[in-house]
Structures are given as structure tokens and as C-alpha cells.
Image (cartoon, coloured by chain):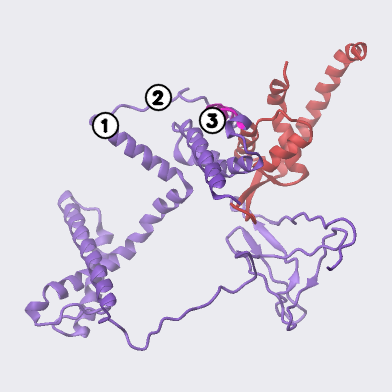
Chain colours: A purple, B red
Amino acid sequence: MNDTIEGAAENQVARYATAVRAAFADLPAPERELLLEDLEDHLAEVAAEDDGPLAARLGAPEAYAAELRASAGLPAPGAGGPAGPRPRLGESAVARRLQRSWRAAVAHPAGRAIVGFLPELRPAWWVLRGYLAVQAVAVVGSPLFAGSGLSFPVPALFESQLLGLLATVAAVAASVRWGRQEPGGVGRRALTVAGNAALALFGVALLLQLGADEAAGDYDRPGEEFVYTGPVSGLRTDGEEITNIFPFDADGRPLRDVYLVDQDGDPVVATHYDNGYLEARIPLDRDGNEVPNRYPQVQHELDPATGQRQPGPTPEFRPPPGPVRSP
Amino acid sequence: MDTTQLLKGVLDLAVLAVVAERDGYGYDVVRRLRAAGLEEVGDASVYGTLRRLYAGGHLTSYVVPSEEGPHRKYYAVNEAGRAQLAAATGRWRSFTDAMDKLLGTHGEEAA
């Protein structure tokens, strides 16, 4: 209802969570994340229950952390392992702070996902790098070839896009080959880093130039129009995707095998949730055709650890007491 | 001896019993323990216990998308958890029987 109140609650949750996480800085990141993955959700739920400070309900963050640690069966901080972080040569306060921010970023699920994902982007960079190298030669060398400069998306060498295309294929192949051979000696690695940096800079410049050209209106591709695709399909409530429907009768008994159709008699189909955990299975009729509008649809949770399937939960619902009348 | 001390010894059993009754996510388990009368149970203790039981192979978990917010990690008791629950329930009963016998007369006097 009120943005300021909600914002304050979020701040409170973030502050409390940071203090709790700080108490687990000695744990390796995966272990810590397993322990703290739903900390923020928990705090938000507690904060939503009443207006008082979190510490009034849960105690000080340090006490919360100690309780969590003890009940999870983890040793007290400093017990067993090396006492505190090892001091290293040349470690300044700034470096430590950077390191801490980095650790915090990596500890966050989103941060972890990004860092884990980066190596997978390397082959894509190798391909892009080959392309950028040819564009760089084309653009930088255009006065020599008497060319017109930037040609996009296919670079032009000696005013020939065919030549540019062939050069791109060759350059991409060479770049991938180079990438797959890394890491080499120090000299080779330095060359790679310098080349990558130069081509990345060139790529940014290229993007800026394309953006400027487009803004100036002299860069357009005929036959392409801006198309508004309209709202996303599927059933929604307040913009939230509906993934399943659970009908209940007036006494609050869940109904099974209910068919839903719209004003035209067409089937009402909820979005099938598909995130690797939930597995929606569309029922089939006698002839093997899908029956997409029979509810509730059976949704199975797939336990990522064991691969076992179990039916998802049925939400609870109580209809209003007494007869319900239309106004 | 206050309830907090007593709870420490039996929280595993209480959490297993609640989750065995119905799958639940962390705060849901906290709420149901409180509703059952264990009002002094600490949030962090329940979360920690769930993690430990999960790490020990007594619980499985799965993620359920929530209508009003984050996806929630639900816990369910598996075979090992059920066996553990049965064994711990047996130990608890014989322990409370013994304590009842010890305290029985005192309780009546006080009443």
C-alpha cells in the first residue's frame, strides 16, 4: 500500500541478512549458500507479519546466526580451522573490501549463476572476436582500399562483402583455434589479453557508431518494420502467470476433472509451467489428443537431487461462509 | 530447566513429525510447530534443523513457485526420515514414560 513502509521493511531485511551472512564468512561459499539460501525470504515473511523491528522477533542477527549454525550442526566459527583470515603480503584495506564485495556478490545466487555461466560464454567470444577482427581491418583499412568504411552486418573488404564474408569465416576459425589452445606461455597469454582488450574496445566503438548512424537516420534496412507483438499469451492475474487452476465447490471441496471454456466455447488453457522442477503433463483423450483445459492439471515436482517425481501440492481454499448472492 | 533447553534435544523429532504430516517450507514448519504448542521454538533453529536433516539424507526438497513472491523450497520426509522418526518416537515414548513415573506423584501433589 505504502512504498515508504515497504521500502523500510526491505531495508531492514537487507541489513539483518547482511549481518547474519557476515557471521558465516568463514564457511566455503557453496556450504554457506546452502545454509542461507532462503534467509531473505524468511526475514521478509517475518517482517510482513508485524511492524516491529526484526530483532524484536528474532533476536540480534549474531544470535540468529549462532542458533542457525548450532542447529545445522556446524562448528563454531574459528573452531578447528585456521584462526581468522591469513594476512597476505600487499593486502590493503581496499583490496580486502573489494574481496569482501566480490565474495558477497558471488555468494548471492544471481552472482553465483553469472560467475558460473561466464566460462560458457568463451566460445561465443571467440566467434565474435574473429568477426570483430575482420571489421577492424575493414574499417581501419578502408582509406587504403578506397572503401566506404563501415558495412554492417557483413564487413566489406576492398568494397566486397563476399571477400569480407570469406575473411570472417577464416578469422572465426582462426580465433576459435587460438582460443582452444589457451593457455600457452606468458608471451602468448599477454598477446591474447592485449588482442582481446583491443577487439573488445573496437566492438564497443562499433556499437556506438551503429547507434549513432541509426539515430541519424542514415542507417536503415528496407523491408524491416518495428512490430509490436502485443501482450504475452497465457492466463494472467494482475500480470502474474497462471500455471494451473484448482476449482473448489461451495463447501470448499476440491473438484477434479473440470473443463473450462471461454465465452466462445474455446478451451481455457493455463500456461504450462516448465522450470525443470515442475513437470506439467497435459492429459490425453482416447485418441491421444491433448486435453489442455481439464483442471486441475497434474503437476509433478521433480526433485533435482534424486530425480524422483511427486505430485505437487494442492493449494488450500475456504469459500466464504453462507450463501453467496449476486448484487 | 526452561523450554528452550528441552527443545534442543527434541527439535529433530518435532521437525520430522511436522514435515511427515505434510510437506512444508522453512517458515511454514516454524508456524506449524508454534501452532502445535512449541511456542518458544527459534526460527533459526528450525531452519538449521531442516538443513541438517536434509544434509543427513532424512529429507528431500523441491522448489514450488509461490504466487506472491519467491519460489519456496519445500521439504518432504523420505524413507530414511520415516525410519528415523519411528525410532526417535520410540525412544521419546520410553523416555517420557520414565519421566512420568518419576514425576507422577509430584504433579498430583501440586495439583
- How far apart, in angstroms, are the residues tagged by discs 1 and 3? 29 Å
Give me the residue at 30% from left, 63% from top: A125
Q: Secondary structure at mark 1?
A: loop
- In the rendered structure, which amino acid carries the disc numbered 3? Pro
Residue that carries the numbered disc 1 in the rendered image: A91
Give me the residue at 54% from left, 30% from top: A61
Relative to A2, residue A27 above or below: above
Determine if marks 2 and 3 fall on one subunit: yes
- How far apart, in angstroms, are the residues tagged by discs 2 and 3? 24 Å
Q: Is residue B78 visible?
A: yes
- Pointer 3 chain: A
Q: Which mark is residue A129?
A: none
Is B80 a magenta residue? no
Is A63 a magenta residue? yes
Q: Which quadrant: the C terminus of chain A?
A: bottom right
Q: Chief secondary structure of the magenta span?
A: helix
- How far apart, in angstroms, are the residues tagged by discs 2 and 1? 18 Å
Give me the residue at 7% from left, 78% from top: A144
Q: Which mark is residue A82?
A: 2
Q: Is residue A1 left or right of residue A142?
A: right
Which mark is nearer the camera, 2 or 1? Answer: 1
Residue that carries the numbered disc 3 in the rendered image: A61
In the picture as drawn, the residue positioned furthest to the bottom comes out as: A223
Which mark is nearer the camera, 1 or 3? Answer: 3
Magenta range is A58-67
Relative to A278, residue A187 above or below: above
Q: Position of residue A1 (x, y in %)?
A: 61, 52
Q: Position of residue A52 (x, y in %)?
A: 62, 35
Determine if marks 1 and 3 fall on one subunit: yes
Give me the residue at 63% from left, 69% from top: A271
